[in-house]
Amino acid sequence: MSTPDTATPRSPAGIRDVAALAQVSTGTVSNTINRPETVHPRTRAAVEKAIAELGFVPNQQARVLTGASSNVIGLVVLDVESPFYMEAAHVIERAVRESGHVVMLCNSEGDTARESGLLSMLAAQRVRGVLLAPATSDDDAVRYTDLPGDLPVVLLDFDGGPEHCSISVDNVAGGRVAVEHLLELGHTRIAVVGGPAGLRQFAHRAQGAREAIVAAGLDPEESLIEVSVSGLGIQDGRRAAELLLEGEMPEAIFCGNDMLAFGVYRGLADAGLVVPDDIALVGYDDIAFARDWVVPLTSVSQPIDELGARAARLLIEHSAREESHVHKQVLLPPELIVRRSSDRRARE
């Protein structure tokens, strides 16, 4: 009779054990793990229950060696410190978890060479697919048509045209509505603060701002001041404020994201200027902290919940590699949220 110290260790549960307990085939267990969307919900629930009872852990390394894709989805963003991308990542993680997948978060830092290395690494890991916020400024996104290992990719916050699946927010419309709001308040000399020149999102927001100025019958050369800084954070916004203070100050400032707007606010306050009494201020993204800023920040809101959830569903559909799949380009509308930083009449 064996003692607890000499008992033969119990072998880990295998896929056949799960199939027997759930009364399904091993193929159905495999599909539940690898392609849960192809399994009937009742059958999937029975398999998942058996997996939980047996403590079965799929061997991801073995799956990679046999050529199978994993249940991992890559998420490559431009800046892991960006509240916008972190909020989007939270929504995406929640959405893919419901379909039995997990997210691997990567940071390209806006560098195309680093981005290429990350895509190659993810392809080597045989991830199911990648949600990618591109670092390129190219309009045609041709660099993403021939990826390592035929890696399925959905472009995030970037419209790459008909050769790609993509989901984005209309950044031109967002810039336009922000400046239209400032014009309606009577401001005729407006500054636009953007990040690195190569980022398409910021270029499109500035384009929308120019369109609003022209539509109002004003000359952009006289009514619009454009300032670009090297980063996307608060310190970069402070630097933008310093640059503006060196010349004739505008009546209002539109920033390409909320973090830049927070920095601009700090720079203006350091110079003794009061928002919105002396100068109006508008941001972009409407991150969670915008409404709780020192002076609640008017901001262009992106539908992050919808963007993240639909991006996750789009990638799972695309990575199923069905012959009937057609690339989809989803464009979502932004919304201006007016608060006190631009309009003293606002309640928030």
Image (cartoon, rainbow, N blue to C red):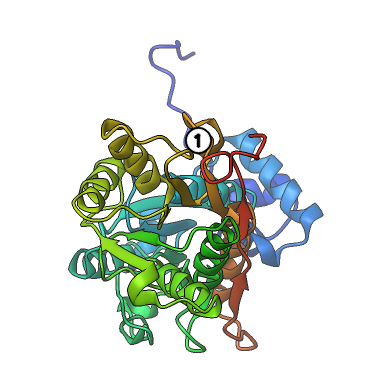
Q: What element carries label 1?
A: loop
Mark 1 Cα-neighbour bin, 10 Å: few <14, some 14–19, many ≥20: few
Q: In this view, does 244 lie above or below 287?
A: below
Q: Relative to the observer, which residue lies in front, 160 or 163?
A: 160
In the image, 101 versus 234, the foreground residue is 234
- For the point 46% across and 29% down, the residue is 294
Label 1: which residue?
Answer: 289
Residue drawn at x 49%, y 79% as measured from the top left: 214
Q: Is residue 66 visible?
A: no
Please name whichever residue, 220 or 39, is drawn nearer the observer in this view of the structure. Answer: 220
- Residue 199 image point, x, y percent: 32, 68
Q: Position of residue 297 (x, y in %)?
A: 51, 41
Q: Is residue 261 above or below residue 175?
A: above
Residue 295 appears in view:
yes
Q: Which of 271 and 158 is in front in this view?
A: 271
- Is 34 drawn above or below residue 287 in the view shown? below
Give residue 263's position: percent from left, percent from top. Answer: 32, 41
Disc tally is 1
Give the quadrant of the C terminus.
top right
Picture quadrant where residue 43 is located: bottom right
Q: Tell me if residue 227 comes above or below residue 90 in the rendering.
A: below
Residue found 38% across the figure and 87% down from its top: 140
Q: In this view, does 201 lie to the left or right of 46?
A: left
Q: Does residue 336 appear to the left or right of 11 in the view shown?
A: right
- Percent from the top left, x then y, of residue 153? 44, 73
Q: Is residue 93 left or right of residue 107?
A: right
Residue kind at label 1, given as amino acid type: Phe
- Report the side of 44 relative to 182 (left or right): right
